[in-house]
Image (cartoon, rainbow, N blue to C red):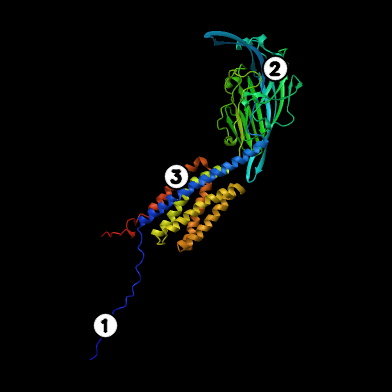
Amino acid sequence: MTQSVSVPPVSSSNPPARSERSPGVKLVIAVLIAVALMVPLLMIYGLLWDRQQQAETAQASIGQGWGGQQTIAGPVIVIPYRATETTTVTENGKDVTRTVNTIRNLYLSPQANTADVVIKPEKRKKAIYETVVYESQISGSANFVLPADIARFGVAREALMLDRAEVRLGVSDARGLVDGNSVAVNGTPLALQPGKGLLSTGNSGTFAFVDWSAAAPLKVDYKIGVRGLGDFKLIPRGVDTRWTVKSSWPNPSFGGDFLPAKRSVTASGFTATYAVPNLALGQAQVLTGDLSPPVMTNYGPRDTYVEPVAVSGPSDGSAGEASGGTAKAVAISLIEPVDLYSQVDRAIKYGFLFIGFTFVAFLMFDIIAGARVAPAEYLLTGIALVLFFVLLLAFAEVIGFTFAYMLASAAIIGLLAFYSAAVLKSWKRARFLAAMLVGLYALLYVLLNLEAYSLLIGSVLMFFALAGVMYMTRSIDWSGLGKKDEVAVG
């Protein structure tokens, strides 16, 4: 009798497969990683600010040996006059009135002031940083007339010390004065002296003594050469002020309290004509107090790195005089056509778009095409997209913004194309992702150059992108593991 032995069947089943996440969970993971990548984007903002501060420090160091922002005022004739002051003091419990004789200054603005200004720009570098400096030549003529009704301004004619009059020109940073400056009164050259400028330029500048005892009309011809950095400001004084400013710089920025009456800007330079009447200035021709410096509005992009001019009282015994008001100024900035730091700053603001569109593409390949994308692969891809802005900033400081943009975008697109081919298991999908990134970087460059329409174009792009995602995922069961079950209709 044969006994049969039963052999248990051998199990051929594979190890249990890894559980598949639902599309909703994958979406949440992608969103969380995208939000986490906002942290390094904010850190790049800090890096951008630090590099910008270093650039401004380098530009300011150039100005220390060349001359900072320049403000030019005058010419103005300053006439000392005798005045009496009555003060009341308390002595031994009694009020005592005293009369003190003092010497004050009368400030007479010209009847007409006409000048031609030529600004010669020059680029200077320190390390990798570059800035624009200039040398300006001002040639002008001003006519002065002593008003016959000077007593209306509270000053007696006989109190004027006309033999001690001065012609003053204000220059905010006297370090920038060059050789060849001159002042002539009625054709007679006068010796220029240092210091004693005008209050509107921080009491910095130059002056010349003139004996005006005859009180006849004066014609003052002046030539001033000054070097500077950043803004160039002119303070109008007088009944009628007319300037013609010329330069070979093709990218000026006009600002201040008055804009040019006429301007012409071409690739070879610009010409601007100013006409400022006394009624527009709102200032009397005769003042018993000097004008204080103009209000420092944002005339140009370089105001932040120029140290303010310290205003000290004059040393001629006229301290304590009342202010004649606040001066007004016109400003011309020789700006760079493209400020790379502002361009990089605006590019970083669109960083979330790159992360968002790339993650959406990965998510679509994952939940629709079945290509599994791990959270670490989302993170590495996002870090590469953030690295683009670091490369852009680093290269832009050396080779300029446009070439830096091309180089940085090509590097990141190439890197992500090779990486996505391995992640998505398909070169066809990798080429699609690379083409999408090319389109995004090209669109961003257009947005950076079309500042007025960047919001409109960006919002329309996001609308169509959202519409496309909604269309492709219309059949996805976000809480399940695949497409919604189709219900047959009989």
Q: Check residue 459 in the rendering and tell me which mark sits there, or answer none.
A: 3
Helix, strand or loop at disc 3? Answer: helix
Q: Residue at x 24, y 88 (%)?
A: 3
Say left or right for 382 vs 27: right
Q: Which mark is residue 146?
A: none
The type of residue carrying mark 3 is: Ser
Q: Nearer the viewer, residue 314 or 69?
A: 314
User: Which type of secondary structure does the marked residue at label 1 adopt?
Assistant: loop
Instruction: Tell me if mark 2 has few (under 14), some (14-19) or many (20+) residues whose alpha carbon lies within 10 angstroms of its own.
Output: many
| Gap in angstroms between the C-alphas marked 2 and 1 | 131 Å
Q: Is residue 137 left or right of residue 478?
A: right
Residue 453 against residue 490 in the figure, above or below: above
For residue 457, say whether it is visible: yes
Quickly name the residue at label 2. 165
Q: Position of residue 300 (x, y in %)?
A: 58, 34
Residue 248 appears in the picture as rendered: no
Residue 373 vs residue 10, the one in the foreground: 10
Q: Which residue type carries mark 2?
A: Ala
Pick whichever of labels 2 and 1 is earlier in the sequence. Answer: 1
Disc assigned to residue 6 = 1
Q: Quadrant of the N terminus?
A: bottom left
Give above or below for 155 relative to 141. above
The image quadrant where one finds the C terminus is bottom left
For residue 140, what is the image quadrant? top right
Q: CA distance from mark 2 to mark 3?
A: 66 Å
Label 1 neighbourhood size at 10 Å, few (<14), some (14-19), many (20+)? Answer: few
Q: Earlier in the sequence, mark 2 or mark 3?
A: 2
Kind of residue at badge 1: Ser
